[in-house]
Image: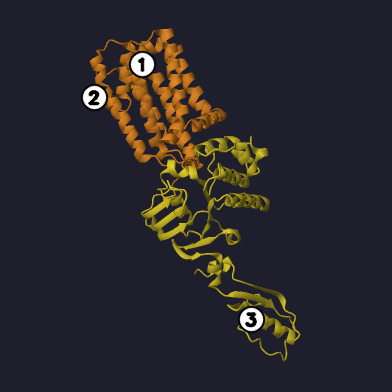
Amino acid sequence: MNTSGDTPVIDVERLNLVYGEFHAVKNLTFQVRRGEFYALLGTNGAGKTSTLEVVEGHRTPASGTVRVFGRNPRDRAAVRPHMGIMLQESGFSPDLTVAESVRIIGALTRRDDSVDRVVDLVGLTTKARTKVSQLSGGEKRRLDFATAVYGTPELIVLDEPTTGLDIQSRDELWAAVDRLREGGTTVVLTTHYLEEAQQRADRIGLMHQGVFHREGTVAELTGALPGVITFGLPSQPLAGVPALPLHVERQPDETFRVATHRIQKDLYTLLGWAEDHGIDLIGLEAGPTRLDDVFRAID
Amino acid sequence: MLGIAYGELVQLFRNRLVLVTSFIMPIAVSAFFVYRHEIFADIGSLGYIAALVVFTVGAFGLYTTAVTTLASRRQNLFLKRLRSTALGDSGILGGLLLPVTVLATVQVVGVLIVLGVVAGGPSDVVLLAVGVVATLAMLVGFALATAGLTNSPEHAQVTTLPVAIGVIAVASWIGLTGTEDLELVKRLVPGGAATELVLNAWNGGTALSESLILLAPTFAWVFLAANLAARMFRWEPRR
């Protein structure tokens, strides 16, 4: 099996996935390179989890090919020792303890590690002897993460890893992921928290209704849309003040919005106009398009 | 596989309800048959008691427990979790079913040894072993197939009844009435030929060639159960 060199870690070619009459994924093609952090994002029902489940070997595609480390992902004995999977839902036996769950699942990954180390990594040391049935939702997600990173796999697939986690647990999880990346681990992520993808992903595949709406780096995705300047004006009438020489949209909340590909120049114009006429701009904000805006522009 | 089996064994002994259903109840019923063996031998034979023990332990200790376990592990996505590891499907199922199968086998063997000591042993131990193994294998196959139709452990209380009650009824029917009437029907119903094998093995008095004929329908049911299991078993809850 090829786990080094130029071979893509994940190679998806014209993938189609059908549930009965519903065509969930349509002709999807993408690759994930070694050491890359790839985020698969999309609207609800876009086909992200279905795609991941094919990559994980849990589903058989209607057509197309999927290769993980150059192998069929359903060849578990060959692929899984190199691949950690954090499922969207927990899937642990309620009567087993945290340590027992990590020991049993960890051993089945065919990777070597210490149960104590992994349990400590996810901050569950004090819960090691606690039954899974007595864990909170966030603690179950951390247990799930522990089994995914057991033995430091070359590839980890994280399906909405931070759902239900508090801020501190999120930070700890991402710190652990960052350490894995420093060691060369490839990461594939789906999440509804766009800022997590925006901060960390090398590339993003944006899915909508089973197809790629767009794919690229954060800069490539956001660069195609204009930057945004927003501001408010004082409530007193601006009698005798010339109109602002920019195309301004009035928002329902009485603020104003300028969408522009020349954000620096237009911001300079706006500030000059306000300074010249003695106007205090209220709540002035300016910045490039965020991933949220790319999302909103899908439809 | 042994790691999963260890986990299942731990859970079996932590869950009192499953422990009572799979271990204590079949043992208690079997102990009653052995304790009152003279009465049951009068209305049937010692072979009849042996057959009842095999099918009672098999139906409740193995079949019902296996269906409940598999439905529960699927419902809480533990099966999906196990399929996210490097272990193959047969290894996963082997690990999940090994503890209940071993426990049921130990129970059957233990109770039959006690029956042999108390009331007199079987005429043909090898034939008896074949009958027991075939019966347990058939019930494992039926358990996998029934688990495919069972959405939850609670649902298993309903879905397991037809097979569990059915095989015990067949064992009682054939144990009490013999096979002089309706021979073909009795040999073709599930567990019928296996019951007759156990009766012949324990009671003796039947030519070996007569008993060997029973292997065909017995293993046909094992094959059919395995086939149903392969077709009907599901790894994930219905979407």
Q: Is residue A192 left or right of residue B125?
A: right
In the rendered image, residue B165, in percent from the top left (x then y), is placed at: 39, 28
Q: Quadrant of the N terminus of chain A?
A: top left
In the figure, what tint was chain A given? yellow
CB of mark 2 within 8 Å of CB of mark 3? no
Tell me, what hue is chain B?
orange
The residues bearing labels 3 and 1 have C-alpha atoms spaced at a distance of 95 Å
Q: As drawn, is B227 to the left or to the right of A31?
A: left
- Residue highlighted by disc 2: B184
Judging depth in this view, the residue of A208 and B220 nearest the camera is A208
Q: Which residue is mark 1?
A: B48
Position in image of residue B34 (x %, y %): 44, 13
Q: What is the CA distance from the residue labelled 1 to the residue labelled 2?
A: 19 Å
Q: Which circle's residue, 1 or 2, is located before the other in the chain?
A: 1
Circle 3 chain = A
Q: Residues within 10 Å of mark 3 (few under 14, many from 20)?
A: some
Residue behind mark 3? A266
Circle 3 or circle 1, nearest the eye: 3
